[in-house]
Image (cartoon, grey):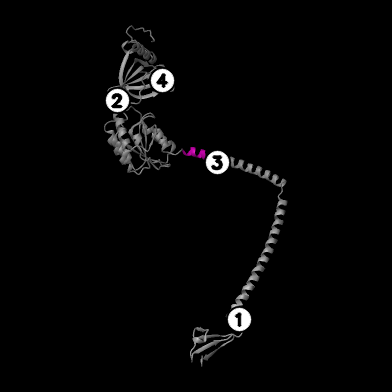
């Protein structure tokens, strides 16, 4: 504490912010009651830092209190909370975090008392919807280049400004449509459903459902069964950016995609910025050009090497030998062909001679004749009767005769 001398006896003390905060801390730490406290409350925002310290909040229906467990005490805890909403009995002391200017509860032990009502209700609804298969439905992919982006959130919240900032920076050509809704309180679920239905009628390509961080009570509107079913009924994919990365709601489980924050949701629905795409394209062009140049150089080196090997192992002799062998094969083929052809010609002549001997014309040429009675060929006299009219065919010409006797 800094004491200021005064010329006036009744002049009040003057503090710096640091000295006043230190004074308050000394007064709190000097109170024996506040240095040995058993505190009952529901855990939220449980987080273990990389340093090993644990940060969380204890709350009840009327208030919340930030809490810290230092790494040394955290390593000796006999009980570790398994999730948000558990009711615990914590022992520790009250003091002031001077840099932040707020008082905190410094816990050194925890005992489990059970789960808070809200968390139990959350788990019951989660189990019910999961059993119905709402979490297992096929997730729709986000469009690569959306033309219309819908946003369901509070128009006065910081989440909307974060989203719009990302969209303007990364994808200014998209049309953004905002459907205002309460994101906290008893009226919020009905407004969220109405906003979803209204924005779906605007033929948007994707919907961002978002709100900033908060505790379980703050996010409770997104743990509503009717909201979850309205999301399932949406004709376009929905991405949620609700709270912080560690926050999970029922809406996150039924959404097509979950983003850890509102800003991350805006980044996920937009392609990379145009200038970044151009830089990537230029980089790829340079890399491709260098790769092709290197490949061509290597091919030229390989070609020169192969030419030297070819010159050393000239195939001309092999080619000449193969040509000679080809000539031999052609000659053999010609002789075989001529021999086979002569055989076939001899066979044809033999068959022709045999065929000629069987030709009726040849028989007629030797002085024989063919007798017809109408269309019937007569080979025996018994086939004839007196006065039958016959046709006698000779080698050259034919005559008509009448039978006088048999």
CA gap, disc 2 and disc 3: 58 Å
Q: Which residue is mark 3?
A: 285
Residue 157 place in picture, x, y as percent:
34, 31
Work out whether residue 18 can be spotted: yes
Residue 47 place in picture, x, y as percent:
39, 24
Could you classify mark 1 by the number of other residues whose Cα lies within 10 Å: few (under 14), some (14-19), or many (20 or more)?
some
CA gap, disc 3 and disc 4: 49 Å
Residue lying farthest to the left in this orientation: 186
- Which of the image's four quarters has the N terminus? top left
Residue 175 place in picture, x, y as percent:
39, 41
Q: Earlier in the sequence, mark 2 or mark 3?
A: 2
- Which label lies toward us, 1 or 2? 1
Q: Which SS class for mark 4?
A: loop
Q: Which residue is mark 1?
A: 362
Write the residue at 59% across / 85% down.
Answer: 368
Which quadrant of the view contains residue 90? top left
Q: Earlier in the sequence, mark 3 or mark 4?
A: 4
Q: Is residue 293 left or right of residue 110?
A: right
- Which label lies toward us, 4 or 2? 2
Which quadrant of the view contains residue 214? top left
Q: Earlier in the sequence, mark 1 or mark 4?
A: 4
Q: Are marks 2 and 3 in contact (CB under 8 Å)?
A: no
Q: Which residues are magenta?
A: 273-287
């Amino acid at each position: 504490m800094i004491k200021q001398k005064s010329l006036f006896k009744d002049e009040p003390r003057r503090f710096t912010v640091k000295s006043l905060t230190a004074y308050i801390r000394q007064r709190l730490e000097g109170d024996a009651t506040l240095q040995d406290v058993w505190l009952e409350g529901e855990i939220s925002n449980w987080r273990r830092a990389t340093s090993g310290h644990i940060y969380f909040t204890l709350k009840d229906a009327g208030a919340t209190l930030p809490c810290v467990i230092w790494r040394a005490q955290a390593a000796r805890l006999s009980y570790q909370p398994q999730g948000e909403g558990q009711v615990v009995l914590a022992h520790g002391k009250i003091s002031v975090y001077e840099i932040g200017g707020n008082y905190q509860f410094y816990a050194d032990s925890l005992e489990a008392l059970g789960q808070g009502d809200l968390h139990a209700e959350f788990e019951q609804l989660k189990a019910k919807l999961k059993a119905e298969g709402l979490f297992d439905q096929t997730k729709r992919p986000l469009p690569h280049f959306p033309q219309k982006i819908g946003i369901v959130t509070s128009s006065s919240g910081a989440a909307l400004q974060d989203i719009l900032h990302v969209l303007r920076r990364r994808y200014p050509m998209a049309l953004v449509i905002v459907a205002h809704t309460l994101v906290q309180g008893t009226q919020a679920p009905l407004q969220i459903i109405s906003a979803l239905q209204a924005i779906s009628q605007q033929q948007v390509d994707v919907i961002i459902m978002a709100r900033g961080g908060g505790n379980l009570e703050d996010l409770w509107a997104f743990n509503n069964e009717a909201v979850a079913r309205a999301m399932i009924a949406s004709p376009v994919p929905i991405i949620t950016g609700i709270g912080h990365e560690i926050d999970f709601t029922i809406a996150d489980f039924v959404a097509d995609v979950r983003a850890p924050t509102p800003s991350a949701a805006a980044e996920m629905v937009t392609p990379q910025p145009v200038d970044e795409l151009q830089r990537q394209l230029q980089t790829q062009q340079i890399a491709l050009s260098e790769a092709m140049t290197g490949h061509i150089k290597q091919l030229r080196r390989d070609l020169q090497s192969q030419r030297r090997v070819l010159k050393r192992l000239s195939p001309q002799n092999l080619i000449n030998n193969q040509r000679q062998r080809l000539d031999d094969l052609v000659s053999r083929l010609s002789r075989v062909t001529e021999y086979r052809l002569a055989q076939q010609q001899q066979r044809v002549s033999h068959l022709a001679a045999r065929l000629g001997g069987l030709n009726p014309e040849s028989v007629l040429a030797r002085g024989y004749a063919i007798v017809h009675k109408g269309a019937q060929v007569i080979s025996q006299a018994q086939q004839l009767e007196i006065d039958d009219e016959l046709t006698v065919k000779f080698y050259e010409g034919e005559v008509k005769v009448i039978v006088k006797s048999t």
